[in-house]
Amino acid sequence: MDDTSPFDEMLRPDGSVRDAYRAFEAWFSSERPGDLRAKAREAEAVFRLTGITFNVYGQAEAGERLIPFDIVPRIIAAREWTRLSKGIEQRVRALNAFLHDIYHRQEIVRAGRLPVGMIARNDAYLSGMIGVEPPGGIYTHIVGIDLVRTGPDQFYVLEDNARCPSGVSYMLENRETMLHMFPELFSANRVQRVSRYPETLHASLAACAPRMCEGDPTVAVLTPGIHNSAYYEHSFLADQMGVELVEGHDLRVVDGRIAMRTTQGYRAIDVLYRRVDDDFLDPLNFRPDSQLGVPGIFDVYRAGGITIANAPGTGVSDDKAIYSYMPEIVEFYTGEKPLLENVPTWRCSDPDSLAHVLDNLEELVVKEVHGSGGYGMLIGPTASKKDIREFRRKLEARPGNYIAQPTLALSTTPIFTRAGLAPRHVDLRPFVLVNPNGIEITPGGLTRVALKKGSLVVNSSQGGGTKDTWVLEDE
């Protein structure tokens, strides 16, 4: 391995196995390749039978797809996870404080640490949230922090997902599948559990109930419906939590509360875990053509009659231009230097930064500030000359719509191929639950893997797959 090779999470440069992977490697070496291939096919059959799919839009082959699952776990040592957890918790605290501030006194703007235009001209900023105090002061009830690794002790935050982070159902199903197929692996490795997530999610949401709540809080999950790309996850989480899965037409305003239709009449909801975007949440306050939301829910929310998780307006913190200020945001609200680094970022709204980006498009990754799912981005080193020309025109037309970053040498973990183990690039989305009583980080999260050799694109919508993520117990 040369010095420019990406960091291999399983193997050291001399080819020896890193400590976290020793038990796995010993087991793998003792298994027959034919048996492992059979297990891989069995895993695919389990996922297909269970219905673990996602929808793809805007393509000729649009429709339901099976997310590829790799049977080789990604393994993280306990000490690495401890350090990561501290950085994740610090960042989530800062994000929640930032959201409270920009909808109240905007101290960070007054202090000159964030340009007022970053807020005033942000499409995700909801003026209707100004002065609103969400129950318990929590905006970011469920957060996904996307991380990439470039070295033994080098982790970067790639982006923050505080609006409607998805993927936790795949984390849980990946673990369930691995436990079913390879119980002997879990006997040889002390792996921290993730199975309590639905129970913890329910308790965390219930702890955020509004003041009007009487007795045990009633929680429900709001889905846009079966055609949504993450519908499987919505139904999965509602089922695992033991709560109702509802659509907008199941809900109405009754006596100043949001109530859901039941066989015994309408029943008030205290906490609504919504998987519907802000624009479609309330046709009386946002998009009047929305068929997905509930007329009047935003007024009930502002009056303290319901908790909406995540809070309306949290999308500001997902903005990739805001992301570029996260080191300042973390320090401003915590008084500490960030424990997790940002990827260096050029804001194309700045003329000097734009000039640099245009001169170096072949080397950079360029992203839309509100983009997600791997769409609307350019990966310079792998892009064609035609792609670069087209993206140059987009940048020149709307520079404020883009940010750019260097192409990182993402770490690799092994996947199982017909030829044996082969390294592929990965990222990690840990899931964080926030309530007035504290912050809980599920050990591990969703590892997404670029299945194509040399590819850096891990998104399932772009051909990536997933892995079970193991965080080992302390020795």
Image (tube, rainbow, N blue to C red):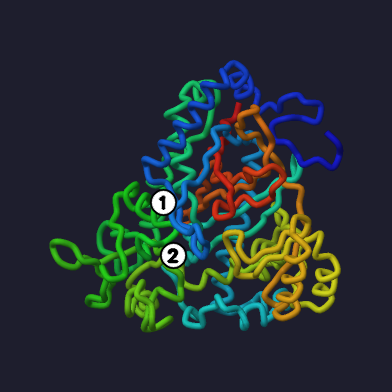
Q: Disc 2 and disc 1: Cα gap in Å? A: 16 Å
Q: Secondary structure at mark 2?
A: helix
Front of the two marks 2 and 1:
1
Percent position of residue 317, x then y: 59, 68
Q: Mark 2 and mark 1 in contact? Answer it, CB < 8 Å.
A: no
Outermost residue toward the left in this view:
264
Residue named by callout 2: 136
Crowding near pointer 2: few (<14 within 10 Å), some, many (20+)? some
Q: Hey, which quadrant is residue 105 in on the image?
A: bottom right
Q: Secondary structure at mark 1?
A: helix
Question: Against 244, is 441 above or below?
Answer: above
Residue named by callout 1: 201
The mark tally for this picture is 2
* Left or right of residue 328: residue 191: left
Question: Against 71, is 302 above or below?
Answer: below
Outermost residue toward the front in this view:
60
Q: What's under tag 2, amino acid-wise?
A: Gly
Crowding near pointer 1: few (<14 within 10 Å), some, many (20+)? many
Outermost residue toward the top in this view:
30
Q: Judge by depth and name the residue closer to the eye, 384 or 411.
A: 384
Percent position of residue 192, x then y: 51, 34
